[in-house]
Structures are given as structure tokens and as C-alpha cells.
């Protein structure tokens, strides 16, 4: 099973804004059709990003999924083609154990850079990125099973 959820209002107020109406109105990710792999992630607020500027964008989302899956986050191709915007880390990797972590409930952020020559203005509700759930494999000699690594989150 896998799905997206909103972070709690308490976390939303801490990370974004104490605005109950905004919290209730922002959209969960959706796919455009049955043949679409990616779930569109929408902007909660209007943004403006100047040339070469980097901004961190809260999504207000967390996601749960199976332990042998990963959620990959990509910038929407239209953002790259139209505005030369890219994810700073190229591809976001969200592991299953990020969900409901103690530091931020698993709140997913994206960080983008405007590599174009013009300021880009985007409106709340526009799709900025997309998430794709993928199963992954591990190798037989994986000796780290059962060993807890201190989280970097």
C-alpha cells in the first residue's frame, strides 16, 4: 500500500504558515491518467525565483509505502523546458522510513534552482514536480540488515 497524506496542521504551521484555510485547500498529488507514472506535486503558495536563485519549497506532504519501495521526486519536464528550472539534487529520493519521522513527520520538501535568465513566477496550485513510486532490489550479501544507522534527517 502506498499513498500521500497531508502533514499535521501543527507541522504545517511550523514549516509553512499558520493558516487553517490554506491547510484545508491545498491539493494532494494526483496522476493525469491511468498511463501516467508520476503524481503531480502542486505548489501551496505563489513563488518567484530569480535567475540563479535556489529556493526550498515545502509540499505539505508525506508519503507512506512498502519497505522495498522508494518515492522518486523529479522536476516536471515542463518546468525544465519552459523555464530552465531544475531540482538542486536532480532526483529526490524518499525512503520508506522517512514517513512520520520524529523531526518533521516526513514532510517532503523540494529545492529548485532557476538556471534561466529571467525571473519565473509560478502560482499556487501549479504542478512543480512529480513523484514516482518504484520497487527496488537488494543484493544477497547485504550484511547491514538489522543494523540501525543513525538517521541523517
Image (cartoon, grey):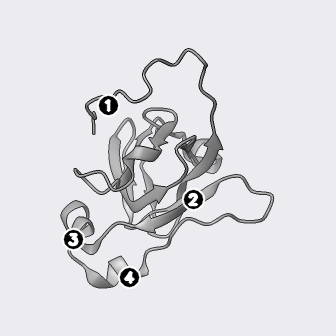
Residue 101 lies, in percent from the top left, at 30, 51
Q: Residue furthest front?
A: 146
Q: Tell me the SS state at disc 2.
A: loop
Disc 3 crowd rating (10 Å Cα; few below 14, some 14-19, many 20+) is few
First-in-chain label (2 vs 1): 2
Q: Is residue 32 left or right of residue 75?
A: right
Quadrant of the frame with the C terminus: top left
Mark 3, residue position: 10
Seen at 26% across and 64% down, the residue is 16
Mark 1, residue position: 148
Mark 2, residue position: 2
Q: Is 151 drawn above or below residue 100 in the view shown?
A: above
Disc 1 crowd rating (10 Å Cα; few below 14, some 14-19, many 20+) is few
Please report contact status of discs 3 and 2: CB closer than 8 Å, yes or no: no
Residue 19 lies, in percent from the top left, at 25, 79
Q: Tell me the SS state at disc 3.
A: helix
First-in-chain label (4 vs 3): 3
Q: Tell me the SS state at disc 4.
A: helix
Q: Is 27 drawn above or below residue 132 in the view shown?
A: below
Seen at 59% across and 42% down, the residue is 80
Q: Is residue 32 left or right of residue 127?
A: right
Disc 2 from disc 1: Cα separation:
23 Å
Amino acid at each position: 500500500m502506498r499513498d500521500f497524506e497531508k502533514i499535521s496542521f501543527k507541522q504545517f504551521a511550523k514549516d509553512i504558515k499558520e493558516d487553517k484555510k490554506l491547510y484545508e485547500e491545498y491539493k494532494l498529488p494526483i496522476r493525469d491518467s491511468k498511463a501516467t507514472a508520476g503524481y503531480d506535486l502542486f505548489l501551496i503558495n505563489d513563488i518567484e525565483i530569480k535567475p540563479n536563485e535556489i529556493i526550498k519549497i515545502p509540499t505539505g506532504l508525506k508519503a507512506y509505502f512498502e519497505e522495498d519501495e522508494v518515492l522518486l521526486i523529479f522536476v516536471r519536464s515542463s518546468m525544465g523546458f519552459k523555464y530552465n528550472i531544475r531540482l538542486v539534487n536532480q532526483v529526490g529520493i524518499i525512503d520508506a522510513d522517512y514517513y512520520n519521522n520524529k523531526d518533521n513527520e516526513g514532510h517532503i520538501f523540494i529545492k529548485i534552482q532557476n538556471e534561466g535568465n529571467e525571473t519565473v513566477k509560478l502560482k499556487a496550485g501549479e504542478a512543480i514536480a512529480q513523484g514516482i513510486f518504484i520497487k527496488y532490489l537488494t543484493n544477497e550479501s547485504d550484511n547491514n540488515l538489522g543494523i540501525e544507522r543513525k538517521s541523517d534527517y
